[in-house]
Amino acid sequence: MMKKIPETSKKNKASIWRSLRLGLYILIGLLVFAYGFQVTEVNLQEFRKETRQASRVRVTRNLAQPDIFEYDYEETIYNAPFYLPCPVGEVPPQPDLVINSHSVSIPDCAESGGTITIEGHNFPPLSTGYIYLVPSSDPNSTLALHKGDFTVDREGYFIAEITLPSDRDSSEVQYIRIRARAKTGAPHFSENAIATWDKIIETVLMALLATTLGTVLAIPMSFLAARNLMKDVKSPLTSIALSLLGWPIGIFMGFIVTGWLGGISLQFSNHWGIDLLVSIVSLLVILAVFRWVMPRSEEIPPGLALRLARLLAGGFIVIISIFTSFHIAGLAETAGNAIVSAEGMFAFLGNFVAKSADILITVTPAIGGMTGGWILSSFLGRMGQRANERLKSGFVRILNIVFAAAAGTTIFTLFGAAVKWLYEIEDPLYTFTLPAIVGGALGLLLAFLTQPKKSLQSGLFLYYVTRTILNAIRSVEALVMAIVFVIWVGIGPFAGVLALGLHTVVSLAKLYSEQVESILPGPLEAIEATGANRLQTILYAVVPQIIPPYISYTMYRWDINVRMSTIIGFVGGGGIGFLLQQNIGLLNYNSASTQMLAIAVVVALMDYISSVLREKYV
Amino acid sequence: MLKIKNLTKVYEGGVLALDNVSFEVPDGQFLAVIGLSGSGKSTLLRCINRLIEPTAGQILWNDVDIAAASTNELRHIRRRIGMVFQNFNLVYRSKVSTNVLAGRLGYVNPVWSLFNRFPKMDYEKAKKTLARVGIEDKADNRADELSGGQQQRVGIARALMQDPEIILADEPVASLDPVLAHSIMKYLEQINQEDGVTVLCSLHFLDIVHRYAHRVVALNQGKLVFEGLPTEIDDAKFKDIYGRDAERVG
């Protein structure tokens, strides 16, 4: 027994300690919530205020009556002579006012501040109207004091009582004006509903364009951001340094060559016939040469002479392609503008063709630059690989030192140029000399630290760079991006498309890459074992496996983009948000309600469509 | 002639999967590789076509060292080495014919692969090969619609498309029932005898080894512990290969 006592007390102690701790946690939780109350300004007093209540009721009622349909109204105005106050002596009795078989009986006069009763017969049933006092001897005066409303019953009768003012006394005749409004014809869509329809179409198409743009760019990026594909990509330092050098030089050369070709083709392109001829001929030439350069399969690897000839022919194809793309763009522009100026039903197609041509002309130099960079860097990279495999270790080390230093210098100098441009620093010591020295030194250091023939994890490095960029851009909301793009391309839906598109690229690339990371590794291994290269392995082992999740994520993203594009108009990015914000700003809640309704319908519809499509294709 | 010389593989983290393994495989031989799970059979087969990079040693095939081949050379070597897997490793969402055609990827120009185009001859060849393994009627089915045995036949057809001189079969029948196992092994035997293709096949069941293999190599914890004829595996050798607690059944 004696022994048991301390045990129980120990248990008690433990449980007391535990309750205390629990109490402490609850207390801390309470404190956090209490502070939260203060910070978020929870306040029911404001909620209960009468003015709040009134506006709440008004806004709620307005929102419940979306402005979608409206009637045309026929207005009839009656002006009945009226004396205020009653004049001394007889007033000649007025007959009942009869217009369009409606009759109104109004007293001839009243004392100032008095009340009169107005009766009407044979009015259109259920119509409404307003009663005014016109304080002027001119019956058509625009000055009219609103004194009351009336609603006609089913028999066409109304009775209304109005109180007259006490500060409008006059010996002259004044008028009581009755403005009756009767609906005519069938209800039709209101102006607001038509504007909403226009904008909701714009919204859905914005989402569509942004999603398409985003998907196209996100697919290649997703492979770069997939760890399982990138971790096996290894290359020797010689190859890395050379391909790094190849990029800027290649981009520069490609840009120059493309610009030069554009200049030449512009000289040619003064007639659509020439454009057409050049386009067709060069497309045929490209096709023929391509078939020769790229035989479908080869049992025996080709010799050096043939390979060189093919390389030259390949360069020829690239140059002709750029040249042709300018001519095709010129042709498309002519054709598109012709269709637009014909002003037919398909003018929008002409606009599409002409705008596409404009885009083609704008991006061709960029594509030329990227192609140049890609060609030069992959060529140099391959040379580096070869050198690394064939040459002696000591020689490779020398190559590594030279090229790594050169690559480091080049990259850091470019970085310096960017700093110079961004911060407008004019001192070449900081924007050129120092970066060049630091870059060169880092390159040297890397070359000295790396064993000459060892392969570096270039794939993993690229993976981390891609991931970092994706995460950085993804953390900026599309709404914020829209503000930036509005400055770039002006207010309108185009800015919205660019903002949503950019956000789509980075978020889809991340989601896609996670799907790539979760594919079965078996097929990958099997395709690799057949002798397929990296591109083929991706096409035949990765792509079939990722199609269902890619479709699913793309649909989901479209869904998100539709929802986002409904509010991107708040910052000037086009779409229905623009209208919504305007109406809320004007306190026009009936109209705003229509837009909210449209958004709800579209989002629900998108949700339904995407779930149906997903079920079908996944 | 395939000569494995002092092949060693150490995985990241220091696991020794192959420890100085050397043996030779004459052309046209059906070689069985046996051993417990984790003894290094799969690693050995994958080192031969360098799906796994060996840490040290040589793999001489017709006097060319596969272990030292460059990326480009490796592509040309791999296309002559077919591989068959335990889990078939088909691309399940692709058609059977696409899976089989994939065996030609080492031969076709990668640029044409972008457009999913193969030379006309390859389409003919795919038809013939599928007929050879008895599933020509399944060419347009999706791979995941096929039964296990049929899937492995697609796997064999894919390897055959490579015009292989060697087939590496990594436990090709471990996921199949005994009847299917024999039908698959018969295809491998047929390829070995009719086409003269060297077959390296890792296997679990000794009855299958006895029935099909010309020669056996056995691995235990990455070491070569036996090399000889299937009939030479007596009780003592069996304990060497499978450990002291193992019991021979059947």
Image (cartoon, rainbow, N blue to C red):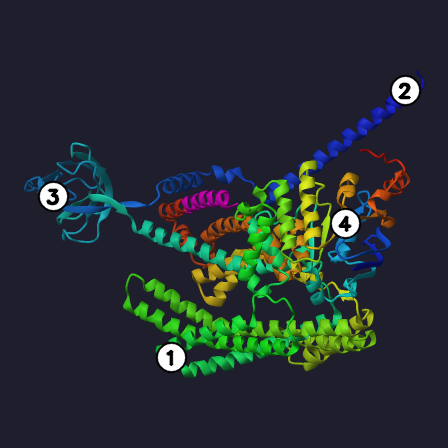
Residue designated by label 1 = A274
Tell me the subunit letter for badge 1: A
Residue designated by label 3 = A87
Residue designated by label 4 = B42
Among numbered discs 3 and 2, the one appearing first in the sequence: 2
Element class at badge 3? loop
Three-letter amino acid code of the residue under disc 1: Ile
The local crowd at label 3, few if under 14, some if 14 to 19, many if 20 or more residues have their Cα within 10 Å, is some
Image marks 4 and 1: residues in contact by CB distance under 8 Å: no
On the same chain, marks 4 and 3? The answer is no
Residue farthest toward the right in the current orientation of the protein = A2
Magenta range is A599-618
On the same chain, marks 1 and 2? The answer is yes
Among numbered discs 3 and 1, the one appearing first in the sequence: 3
Image marks 4 and 3: residues in contact by CB distance under 8 Å: no
Tell me the subunit letter for badge 4: B
Three-letter amino acid code of the residue under disc 2: Ile
On the same chain, marks 3 and 2? The answer is yes
Between the C-alphas of marks 4 and 1, the distance is 64 Å
Residue A388 vs residue A350, the one in the foreground: A388
